[in-house]
Amino acid sequence: MIIEKIRQIWKARDLRNKILFVLGMLVIFRLVAHIPVPGVDTAALKQLFNSNQVLGLMDLFSGGGMSNFSIVMMGVGPYITSSIIFQLLGMIVPKIEEMQKEESGRQKINMWTRWATVPLAIMQAYAMINLLERSARNIIISVSSLDLVMMVMTVTVGTMFLMWLGELISEKKIGNGISLIIFAGIIAALPQVLSQILLSFDKSQLFTLIGFVAIAIVTVVGVVIINEGQRNIPVQYARQIRGGRTSGGTNTHLPLRVNMAGVIPIIFAISIIMFPSMVAQFFLSAKTVWIANFSQWTINIFQNQLFYGIIYFLLVFAFTYFYTEIVFHPDQIAENLQKQGGFVPGIRPGRHTTEYLGSITHKIILVGALFLGLIAVLPLVMRYFTGIQSLAIGGTSLLIVVSVVIDTVKQIQSQMTMREYDGV
């Protein structure tokens, strides 16, 4: 069955070209991820990232580019942060909320998001270089002001290049470009992780390895269940008689997915977790004592396992609700149903239907948000008992990989279905 599907996809010339184009863009991403910025002790850098949880998550976003100190070391993190800012503004500023409902308005917001990515990339690049320069491991030897400017500019251009690649991929409708870039980075790091586990394996770690496999299976199954789960709301269409012809009178359903946000809450949560520590790096050398102390305290508290786990869970939970509010509009659905002569049995059209759909959505999203948050922190619990850093990173990686694969497969299937309707 799977082989037959692959054959059908390969025979469809336009779809095949799109997939090959996306693969080509991902190959380019992996190539530039290995082009280093000079002046760094890469061996000491990798040791630092292996011993630091937050830095490990940053490296996850950059697809290993940060641990290599490559020209794309910041990955797409600044672009994601910029997107979060404008989506939050859409809920606060009425004018931006109105713009989000129109195509021309969305294009302007996308343009502003790209512009805002530049200063965010500069700020994050400077903070990371400053962090590495101050590290006790002597990762970066003292650099001149000109060298620092060149490093920041190079890394910023690398981020903008990845943002451009992501948009080119998204245009092909074979998956979300930004998510696929993160996905490619995770998959590329998989052989190295497996080799490290095999080389360092001994009999005393057997139960730990079994626990890792178990947590991976639970994560994969859980993400699939949540992504595929939905509640069907029954919808009836009234019969209409026009010119002696009868139309309508059909029964159908409105599917409401348990997790409408997909992998976005995980990506948003990690971006927010990284941001305070990055900003704090700017103020470590502040002349005002309390500002310097507060910056150090911020960095230290995000290294605390318990605090980190709680914040991670709450952010995943909150962003699941937040993103659902952005993409799902019960008032528009209720209005469209009323225009088309449809209604939910036992519920009055209009405002009552809006309230009913909103209530049902909040209930099912509660289950999805709780489950997604628990799966996100489950590897952290395992790490607490085993002390193995790779479990924490591996859990987040699996969440992203499974969700991206499901979304990409659905988009490919959608294009195949459209071809069948078009008779191609």
Image: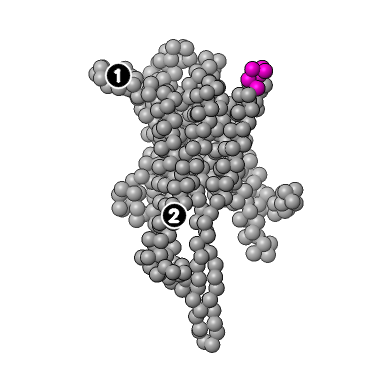
Helix, strand or loop status at disc 1: helix
- The one nearer the camera, 185 or 144, is 185
Can you identify the residue that label 1 sits on?
Answer: 293
Could you tell me which residue is drawn at 48 percent across and 21 percent down?
Answer: 52
**Which picture quadrant has residue 22?**
top right
Could you tell me which residue is drawn at 55 percent across and 38 percent down?
Answer: 399
Q: Residue 423, image x and y in percent?
A: 68, 65
Q: Residue 117, image x and y in percent?
A: 41, 37
> Is the residue 77 above or below the residue 133 in the image?
below
First to last magenta residue range: 201-206
Could you tell me which residue is drawn at 41 percent across and 23 percent down?
Answer: 304
Kindly identify the amino acid type of the residue bearing the numbered disc 1: Asn
**Which picture quadrant has residue 23?**
top right
Q: Residue 337, image x and y in percent?
A: 45, 68
Residue 361 image label: 2
Kindly identify the amino acid type of the residue bearing the numbered disc 2: Thr
> Is the residue 380 above or below the residue 400 in the image?
above
